[in-house]
Amino acid sequence: MKALWQISRPLNVFIAFLSVFFSAWLVVDDPFTVLIIRTALSAALVTAAANVINDIFDLDIDRVNKPHRPLPAGRLSVSRAWWFYNGLNLLALILVIDQPALLSIAAGSAWLLYLYSKTLKRLPFGGNLLVAVISGVAFLYGALAAGDVSAACFPALFAALFHLARELIKDLEDVDGDRQYGARTLAVQYGRTTVLKMVDAVFIILFSLLWLPFLVGLYNIYYIYMVMPGVAGVLLWCALSLHQNSSVHNLARISMILKIDMLIGLVSIYAGVKL
């Protein structure tokens, strides 16, 4: 059970649930409805399944990059991981089976994430972009369940850019194992310097766009008070740290910091809309 819990990457699962729940909350005052909870749970389960299938297909690479993970460490068999993966996706679809639009998004996301782990992850940029887009779609998914997709447009854009930066950083983190097993990621194909420049570009775009919802009058001043130090400040620190120290340890630390910073971004948006 511990290995199943670890392979699902519970922090990622929690962020997926929170993203969907939060985007619905932007639309309605009371998001604690059966449909919204079901929708958020389905997104969390699709995320967990994606993490499992990623570890299945990355088993050889993880023996080099992440030997502590449940599969390379031998604490979970591949066959059990496959059963777990299928069960998670099946339950995710059952939760929204009565909602055709939500069901289509959940099924489509699950299929694309399978393709990502099987093929696209090992190709330059395509896999990075796919994960970023699906991360943004999670916010549209929650808003759709609440009845107004437009409310989630900016959160979806910010989430996509955040995840794109993290995916590029993870390419740098995993470059040794990826190169050894023939994965043609951006870091393998074009080197660290090029990928660092791409991360810088994503950070600059994200930093510039953070102001936009306030400038067009969608979010109030409380959003600026929170997002500038809590998100923009963290992006600046991460950019500087990446250039000062691009060791695997620091790359993993920055990736985790960005993951946690997404939660600060969610709180900032909530403050900008609800306070």
Image (spheres, grey):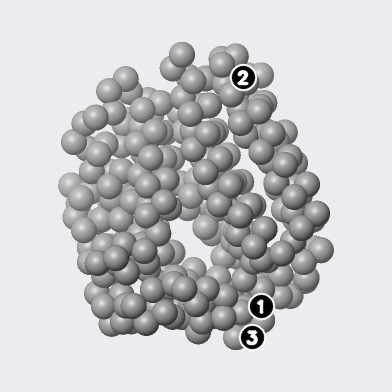
Sequence-wise first label, 2 or 1 = 1
- Label 1 Cα neighbours within 10 Å, binned few <14 / some 14-19 / many ≥20: some
Q: Is residue 129 above or below residue 261?
A: below
The residue positioned 77% from the left and 66% from the top of the image is 192
Q: Position of residue 90 (x, y in %)?
A: 22, 63
Q: Amino acid at mark 3?
A: Gln
Q: Amino acid at mark 2?
A: Tyr
- Assign a secondary structure to mark 3: helix
Element type where label 1 sits in the image: helix
Which image quadrant: the N terminus?
A: bottom left
Residue 81 seen in render: yes
**Position of residue 109 measured from the top left corner of the image (x, y, whole percent):** 40, 58
Q: Is residue 207 above or below residue 11?
A: above
Name the mark on residue 225: 2
Is the Cβ of the residue at disc 1 closer than 8 Å to that at disc 3?
A: yes
Q: Residue at x 62, y 19 (%)?
A: 225
- From the top left corner, tell me how far across and down residue 57 is, in percent: 45, 78
Q: State how far apart marks 2 and 1 are (Cα).
A: 41 Å
The residue to which callout 3 is attached is 180
Q: CA distance from mark 3 to mark 2?
A: 46 Å
Specify whether 77 is left or right of 128.
left
Circle 2 SS class: helix
Q: Is residue 15 above or below residue 146?
A: below
Answer left or right for 162 relative to 105: right
- Most foreground residue, 55 or 260: 260
- The residue depicted at 23 percent of the width and 43 percent of the height is 38
Seen in the image, is 143 located left or right of residue 199? left
Rendered location of residue 144, percent (x, y): 35, 37
Q: Nearer the viewer, residue 260 or 161?
A: 260
The residue singled out by tag 1 in the image is 176
